[in-house]
Image (cartoon, rainbow, N blue to C red):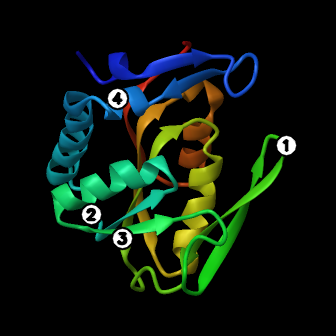
């Protein structure tokens, strides 16, 4: 059974008209979780994307990013919601459908020039990833690529990220679904 078929669809969540793609059914399945990590590991061992560290976006980016970092022998750095990191941080605000939100990273999280693989579970609008990228750059990192389990291309996040000059990879997509 492929990765895509292990992802649950929840209609009208978090609001009417949205088809939510829930990866918890994928990662609770040991075969599904292994497929995700093994496929990402194979990609980054074989395709020539150079990076030094993995940065994961709270919260599901932690799950995928830390397992992938372990498999590849890389370090892992969290990007968190405000007030969750104990040392000095820098933050980046970004737009939501109704208002704004903010994410943070430790100011000493990355070495100057560190090449980063940015990881999250799902790419929809691209807002969180596009907030994390300048945050990484503020602390001296360079985004080599952004990796996701799921891409929802109809929402347009991938186009926005590519337009900013970043590379994008996803394991599966729900296009027109």
Q: Name the residue under label 4.
A: 26
- Please tell me which of labels 4 and 2 falls first in the chain: 4
On residue 69, which mark appears?
Answer: none
Q: How crowded is mark 4: few (under 14 residues within 10 Å), some or many (20 or more)?
A: many
Above/below status of 100 relative to 7:
below
* Distance in Å between CA atoms under marks 1 and 3: 33 Å
* Mark in the foreground, 1 or 4: 4
Q: Where is residue 114 in the image (x, y as percent from the top left)?
A: 37, 77
Q: Which of 131 and 100 is in front in this view?
A: 100
Q: Is mark 2 on a helix, strand or loop?
A: loop
Tell which circle, 1 or 3, labels the residue nearer the N-terminal end: 1
Distance from label 4 to label 3 (Cα)? 29 Å
- Secondary structure of the residue carrying tag 4 is helix
Q: Name the residue under label 2.
A: 50
Residue wearing tag 1: 98
Pointers 1 and 4 in contact (CB under 8 A)? no
Above or below, 136 relative to 5: below
Q: Label 3 neighbourhood size at 10 Å, few (<14), some (14-19), many (20+)? A: many
Q: Which residue is under mark 3?
A: 115
């Amino acid at each position: 059974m492929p990765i895509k078929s292990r992802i649950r669809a929840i209609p009208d969540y978090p609001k009417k008209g949205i088809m939510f793609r829930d990866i918890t059914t994928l990662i609770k399945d040991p075969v599904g979780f292994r497929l995700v990590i093994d496929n990402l590991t194979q990609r980054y061992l074989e395709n020539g994307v150079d990076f030094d560290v993995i940065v994961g976006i709270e919260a599901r980016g932690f799950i995928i990013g830390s397992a992938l970092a372990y498999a590849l022998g890389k370090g892992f750095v969290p990007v968190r919601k405000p007030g969750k990191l104990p040392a000095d941080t820098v933050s980046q605000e970004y737009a939501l459908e109704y208002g704004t939100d903010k994410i943070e990273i430790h100011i000493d999280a990355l070495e100057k020039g560190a090449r980063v693989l940015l990881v999250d579970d799902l790419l929809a609008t691209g807002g969180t990833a596009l907030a994390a990228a300048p945050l990484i750059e503020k602390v001296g990192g360079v985004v080599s690529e952004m990796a996701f389990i799921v891409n929802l291309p109809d929402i347009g996040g991938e186009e926005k990220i590519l337009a900013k000059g970043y590379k994008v990879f996803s394991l599966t997509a729900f296009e027109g679904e």
